[in-house]
Image (tube, helix red, strand yellow):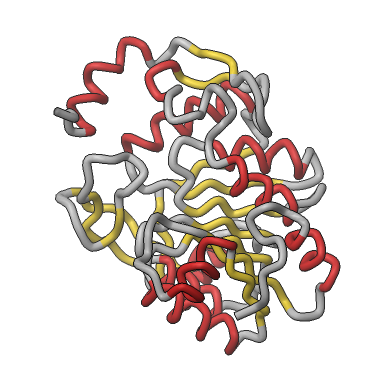
Amino acid sequence: MRLPIRVRRVLSRPLDSIPVRVRAGPNEGCRWSLPVSGRGFASGRFEVAKFEALAAIVSTGDVVWDVGAHYGYATLLTTRIVGPEGSVWSFEPSPLNRSYLTRHVAWNCSGRANVLPYALAERDGTEAFGGSDSSMALGLGRGDEEVEVRSISGMLDAGVPPPTVMKVDAEGSESRIVESLVRSQVRPVLMCAIHDQSQLELCTEALHQADYEVLPSGPIRKFLDDDSAWRGDPDIVAFPRNDPRLRDRVSRTDLFRDVSAL
């Protein structure tokens, strides 16, 4: 029987401060907390194709918003790429996840990545959050926690620099973030995990209205072409139509090779 997150967290707390080194992959050499080193995090095998694609859209000097940062795997990767000229802003509303995220930032990129305790959506306020026994599947509108929610415009007004790249993994709330993005004045390159076909349709429609080109990953294209059941949280990448250079870079990755735009 798999123990609930809170129970696992209590049991693992004495081990939190013990680091292991990531052995391979884009975060090779980074320090990672022992209790959450499974699932391919410490071995460097965690979602290799996804992070290859993310690396393709990030450049030196970028401002990256990591929305739904979880334990910080994407934060560590993008901090390495943007260098001292850029910055990374990591949004993680779950206190449990954020404790590891904060530790990983302190161990690896203190002063270069910024941890924020908010969920992003189309409004400012508070909302229920939680609802799963997996730390990777906590979401808005369910569960017994209450978290602070911010719009993209609200974060910009608060002084967070506008993103040039956004990575989003929001467990079914992605269309709310895309709606918030479209309402704002910023137009970053977007990599977004999509949790069902309804979310794909909502996100694609909103992005088209903002004159984005939307590329589905290979798994999404297969779902659509085969009319098969949705599984997992495959990604889209969306970018302004006047940037063919980025489209070419993304199209060379395993996840987006030979796919046509939506």
Q: Quadrant of the C terminus?
A: bottom right
The answer to whether residue 102 is left or right of residue 143 is: right
Vertical side of 115 occupied by 233: above or below: below
User: Which residue is painted at 81% across and 73% down in the image?
Assistant: 243
Q: Which image quarter is the N terminus in?
A: top left
Residue 208 at what x, y percent from top left? 59, 86
Quadrant in the picture for residue 65: bottom right
- Compared with 9, 120 (above or below) is below
Report the residue at 66% width, 61% height from top.
Answer: 256
Q: Please name the residue shown 58% across and 69% down the image.
A: 216
Left or right of 129 in this view: 210:
right
> Observer-nearest residue: 15 or 133?
133
Judged from this view, the residue extending furthest toward the right is 245
Q: Position of residue 88 (x, y in %)?
A: 64, 46
Residue farthest toward the front in the current orientation of the protein: 226
Is residue 122 visible in the rendered image? The answer is no
